[in-house]
Every structure is written in structure tokens, then in C-alpha cells.
Image: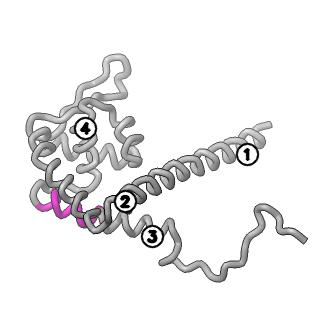
Amino acid sequence: MPAEPHAAIDQGPLRLEQFLPYQLNLVAALVSEALSRVYARRYRIGIPEWRVLVTLGQFGVMTGKVIGAHTHMHKTKVSRAVAFLEKRKLLARRVNRADMRESFLSLTAAGRAIYEELTPQALDFARRLTEILTPADRDAFHRALQQITDRSAQLVAEVITHNGAKANAREL
């Protein structure tokens, strides 16, 4: 009797250290911790502030909502990071006259100076992180990472669509 397409395959117990989502999370946490040593002590900013600062350094002017979408950070984290950077005078806020609930955010001269000083250090860190790979392995890794990122986004969209369909069915 053939197995159903979605039937669970008995693969033994789930081993956390061999589970891809855990492995990706572990690598991300270790890389973030190591990278934070480049900017945390010298600039006294954390990971959320770093992400906001670098995003504004890259794109110029953005809203908090757009920063959150780009960095995949929750709006509360973005808001706290923005408030911290604004208090430190690294970020400027300009109210959107078309929508008073929204502000346009940009780096101040001091924020831009930190971004420009930090950028070569961050790029060097990224280079050092992957220098252990051959050029071919590095290319394959980047392709695989992009494919996993794209597939993850598809799975998130499927869950959202599925949950939305359930919610709509309940409303009927």
C-alpha cells in the first residue's frame, strides 16, 4: 500500500542539533554576537539599533514601518531602537504631513559618520567569516542561502494564506 503524499516518515527522534531551523538560528545568534563586538563597545548600540542605523545608512530616508519590513524586526523593537538613536542624536525624525501618524527617519551627520566608520569593519567581518570557504563553496553557499530564504518566504505566505482561509471560513 503506497504511503500518502503527506504521511509522516519515521526518521527517529528529532535531534535539535541536526534540525536545520535550529542550526540556522544558532549560526545567526553566534554571528550577531560576534559582529556586535565590532560596534557594541565602541558605539554603545545593540543589534536593533545597529540594524536601523545600517538600514538608514543604506537607503537614506525611511519610515519605521518600512525599516521593520526590511529588517524583519517587530515594530516595537524598531520603535525602541529609533527612540534610542534619536535620543543619542544619531537619527532625525520628520513628521509625514500627509499622515501625521508616520515619520520619515534619516541619519544625522553623527549617525552618518558612525555608519561610514562602521561599514568597512562590518564588511571585513563578513569577509573573515566566509574566508574559510573556497570561492566555489562560497558561491554555492550564497545560492543555497538565497534558495532557503525564498522557500522560507513561500512557507510563511502559505501559512498566512491558510490561516486567512480558515478565518474567512469561520466568518461565513
**Which of the two labelled residues, at mark 2 and mark 4, occupies the earlier sequence position?**
4
Q: Quadrant of residue 157?
A: top right
Q: Quadrant of residue 164?
A: top right
Q: Secondary structure at mark 3?
A: helix
| Stretch of the chain drawn in magenta | 32-41
Specify whether 58 is left or right of 145: left
Residue 137: percent from the left, percent from the top? 38, 62
Q: Amino acid at mark 1?
A: Lys
Residue receiving disc 2: 136
Q: Amino acid at mark 2?
A: Ala
**Which of the two labelled residues, at mark 1 and mark 2, occupies the earlier sequence position?**
2
Identify the mark at residue 58; answer none if there is no mark.
Answer: 4
**Which of the two labelled residues, at mark 3 and mark 1, occupies the earlier sequence position?**
3
Residue drawn at (48%, 78%) of the image: 17
**Which of the two labelled residues, at mark 3 and mark 2, occupies the earlier sequence position?**
3
Q: Amino acid at mark 4?
A: Gln
- Asked whether 83 or 90 is in front, the reply is 90
**Which of the two labelled residues, at mark 4 and mark 3, occupies the earlier sequence position?**
3
